[in-house]
Amino acid sequence: MKEHKAPFGLTPGAAEILRAEASLSEEEYSYVHLSPEWHAELLDPAGWTSVLETFAHTMKLSVALSDPEGRLLGICHNPQPVWSLAHSGAEKFGDTGCPFCLLPAGQRCSAVQDALRTDGVAMVQDQAGLTHVAVPLSLGGQHLGTLLAGQVFSHYPEPLPLQRLARARHVSPQRLWAAAIRQVPIARTTLQLYAKLLMALGQGFLGQRYSAILQRKLAQTSQRYRLFFDGVKDYALLTVDPAGRITSWNSGAQRLFGYREGEIMGQDACRLSAADGVPAEGLQQPMSEADKSGWVEWEGWRVRNDGTRFLGTSVLASLGHGETREYGVLIRDVTELRRSAQELQQAQKMEGIGVLAGGIAHDFNNLLTGVMGSLTLIKGNLSPDDSSYSIIEIAERSSVRAAELVAQLLAYAGKGKFAISRFDLSMLIAEMLPLIAASIPKTVRLELALKPDLPWIEADASQIRQIVMNLIINGAEAIGAEGGTVQVATGLVGEGSDLFMQVKDSGSGMSETTKAQIFDPFFSTKFTGRGLGLAAVSGIVRSHRGALQVDSIPGQGTTFTVSFPTVPAGVQKPAAAPSSKAPRGTGTILIADDESSLTALAEVILKQSGYSVLLAANGQEAVDIFRQNAAGITAVLLDMTMPVMGGQAAFALIREIRPGVPIILSTGYSETFAREELGDAVVGFIQKPYGAAQLLKSIQDAIQQAG
């Protein structure tokens, strides 16, 4: 049990308000008259500084107080890097109706109006991808203003919107991007939770400030106490006597615990923490500490009337003296807040490892492209009878195996190579049954509940097969020699916007420690285990905009549930087989890539096929060379990831100079990922590593399509 100096922002004088909560009915404060002087005092920015600064730096958000029109009252606390940098580039950027947005001139933010209209949380995302929320502040049915919080990304920042913003705001794109990638994204669901907490804290603090005014100016203290409690109505508030018996009980306590006032009055407060497996928690120790220091705060498990449990933060304050002494108790449910914090930490860890894996895969793909392309050229000039021919084939096979490992790294990073099609997931699993049956022990019984006639999913079928095999084999291995069942089911999530596949085993289950590590690369509970395993599964799911959930209890088995967005069912069209020969060509090809061995190889391949070649080591060089030779360049081979200026920025600038020029993107990431980055304007694409025939075919196809 730990003592603090300011739980939930309460002052020692607010302890009396805890005690008086039960004395008023809802009808006694339906409307509050606020004079202009009181209104100004309630929203005095200096008075809000401490609570806003604390919230801003604790939650890593920017926070500010505004009037009902959205104008700031005071400063923006803890402004975020991208927002601050964008505002430094020009003095005025038009009226957006919100100082937290980076909207273009003429567009208005509706967050404040929406929050006041709905009396709830309003969330807005601007053109840069920055997200913020607005929550209302009200007393007695009157809206006094809002609290704004955010200036954060809800997902990893996107380069192209930031580049547009940099041009509009006259700031350096490189500085803006560097600022963006330093900001840790906060998921929209997590930001929603933070917003609800901010609304509760803001209302509580507003109620506290109003109570302070009433303590100075109002004669009837009962009205003062009740107005404060209007600000903390989402908390359980009760009082107990020195023996621990409950003497008052507010509506928030009834909502949280499920007891009506008549049921709980006079009962021992231990009833709120006594349940199977949870020892009854008496209040004698916190009472003793509160008598010495005024109040204490602690966290522990609580139990509702229906037997369900929740994690609660409790504050106990000493009220009065002698025979009239009581203790006020404030309890808040923090179960979801703690769970969200753990999920956010896990997501950030996975994102960090994914970025590392993607970076390694990118560099390795560049090297493999040079190796495989060179082997292709050498092999093409050798007779099969040549003694070196078989050695070249061995090197080619080794390169292919290396490329497969890179593909696993990219799958984990969520940027793998995909052959996207639409298909029936239940049918795909059914077609895999012979392979699945041969891959699991005879002691494991496979039970299927594959729902027919479901909507289809849009995905890479081979990647989905990898997920199915991995999860089923993992489940079978968890069962052990004694035998058991692996259940595989498909169906719709909720009203049908998503489709799920569930793999449930009757194995040994996992501890929380093991469960926290299963998606780490190369983690295995088997002595001989190695590889990416579930880490690759997690990456594939993320790259398909799916969700992955794990439920496991030691001794009771594990359930993996994977869900994907659905598309309408239809008839799958087989892809046309690509041509195996690429014709010779003419013209000038601009190659932009930071890997010198790769550009040298591509230059040899293209020159042997009749093309002229210009070389650039980064995006900026590519733009400069293209500007000087725009009319004479036939096509551009553009790497996505380069120093100085990346492929996305170079792509946009080259298209501004000559909109119709064929551009072939060259990257180790998937075509889907590339097109998401640059949109439908991309003409050509080639996946690293590639050979000579692939390179020539990609360039010829892009030129023909543009022509």
Image (cartoon, rainbow, N blue to C red):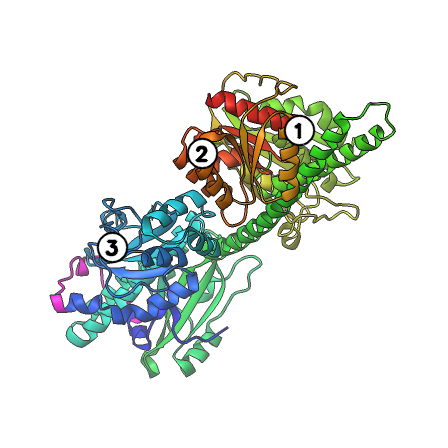
Q: Secondary structure at mark 3?
A: loop
Q: Judge from the rendering whether residue 420 lies leftward or rightward of residue 14; answer left or right.
A: right
Tell whether label 2 touches label 3 (CB within 8 Å): no
Q: Judge from the rendering whether residue 296 lies leftward or rightward of residue 447; answer left or right.
A: left
Q: Is residue 402 magenta?
A: no
Q: Nearer the viewer, residue 592 or 580?
A: 592
- Residue 524 coordinates in the image, percent (x, y): 72, 48
Q: Earlier in the sequence, mark 1 or mark 2?
A: 2
Q: CA distance from mark 1 to mark 2?
A: 26 Å
Q: Earlier in the sequence, mark 3 or mark 1?
A: 3
- Residue 153 coordinates in the image, percent (x, y): 42, 50
Q: Height in image: 197 above or below 212?
A: above
| Residue 630 circle label | 2
Tell me if I can see residue 448 in this picture. no
Q: Nearer the viewer, residue 182 or 707?
A: 707
Q: Secondary structure at mark 2?
A: helix
Give the amino acid type for the residue marked by disc 3 in the picture. Answer: Lys
| Residue 692 circle label | 1
Give the amino acid type for the residue marked by disc 1 in the picture. Answer: Ala
Which dot, 3 or 2, sits closer to the camera?
2
Instruction: State the extent of the magenta-drawn residues as a range.
Output: 19-37
Q: Nearer the viewer, residue 119 or 575?
A: 575
Tell me if I can see residue 588 in this picture. yes
Tag 3 residue: 92
- Residue 303 coordinates in the image, percent (x, y): 47, 57
